[in-house]
Amino acid sequence: MGLRSTSSSLKFGLAASALLVLVSGCATPPQTEGKAVAVMNDEVYDPLEPMNRYFFDVNYALDALFLKPVAEMYVGVVPTPVRDSVTNFLTNLSQPIYLINNVLQGELNRAGDNMGAFFTNTFLGVGGLFDVAQLNTQEEDLGQTFAVWGISEGPYLVVPVLGPRTTRAAVGGVGDYFLDPVNYAARENDMDNFPIVRAAVHGLDQRSRSLGALDEIERTSIDFYAAVRSLYRQNRNNLILNGASNSTQLPSMNFDDDDDNMAKKN
């Protein structure tokens, strides 16, 4: 009974999020279609800034109270090889949705890499705990696919708990949830809590790898909200263009090397 109730609540939350971003999208200014044009405009369209700043402060407080302390404990207690295996496992679970989005974008070679990585790491990498394939596949989501199709990104949003999004990315995230074969398999096997647990572990993994970097950005930023907004936008542009962006480069939001930097300081 509890599992079904949790699943229904999650689906309601996803539907509500979709409604919110779809309504917000009505205020999106017209943009020329085309992949490069859709992502290269340097202006961040943030008509909901007062509300976004409020939710940014709420998320910041939640992070300070819960997520950051847990992430620090996780880094302090769990050895690096084990944390790397958690990252590998989560990445391997995401390969099917990466594959689907690469196909939708017409990136068949990248889709082949996703398939190769998933089967190799699943069967030879102990369920994906070890990255045997070493194909370095890139994150792909429906928000990126929408950008490739020429859909404008819409207003910038700060979603409670989930953090920064563009409208396009937020709608894409809802679509990815229902398109993801892993989530479908979990539902078919009565593992209704699986997406929630997966999202929680993914959030902890991401936060644990960004501890020092985010602290440094906050320390050196005059306006932390604006800095995070710019960094998020730059990271999305680079993902959409598969790292081929020619725009002015801001600090990357990829904090994979953060643990190494912290180790050197210690």
Image (cartoon, grey):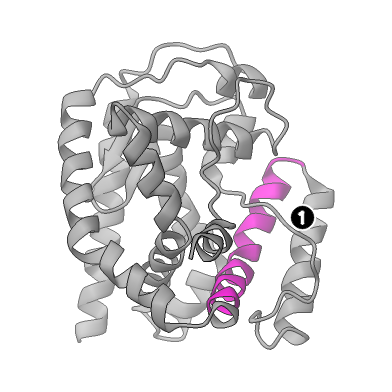
User: The N terminus lies in which quarter of the figure?
Assistant: bottom left
Look at mark 1 in the image and give the residue it sits on. 111
Residue 117 position by quadrant: bottom right
Q: What element carries label 1?
A: helix
Which residue is painted at 40% across and 51% down in the image?
174
Answer left or right for 74 relative to 186.
left
Task: Judge whether residue 87 is colored magenta.
Answer: yes
Query: Relative to 176, is 220 above or below?
Result: above
Which residue is painted at 23% across and 74% down in the image?
6
For badge 1, the amino acid type reads Ala
For the residue pair 56 and 68, the one nearer the viewer reads as: 68
Task: Judge whether residue 247 is colored magenta.
Answer: no
Which residue is painted at 63% across and 20% down in the image?
247
Q: Position of residue 126 (x, y in %)?
A: 69, 88
Report the number of numbered marks: 1
Query: Relative to 156, is 213 above or below?
Result: below
Magenta region's main secondary structure?
helix
Residue 44 position by quadrant: top left
Q: Where is residue 8 in the image (x, y as percent from the top left)?
A: 24, 69
Instruction: Answer few, some or many: residues within 10 Å of disc 1's Cα (few below 14, many 20 plus, some between 14 and 19).
Output: many
Answer left or right for 54 relative to 96.
left
Answer left or right for 94 relative to 208.
right
Q: Where is residue 10 in the image (x, y as percent from the top left)?
A: 27, 64
Q: Where is residue 63 in the image (x, y as percent from the top left)?
A: 24, 57
Q: What stretch is highlighted in magenta?
A: 83-106
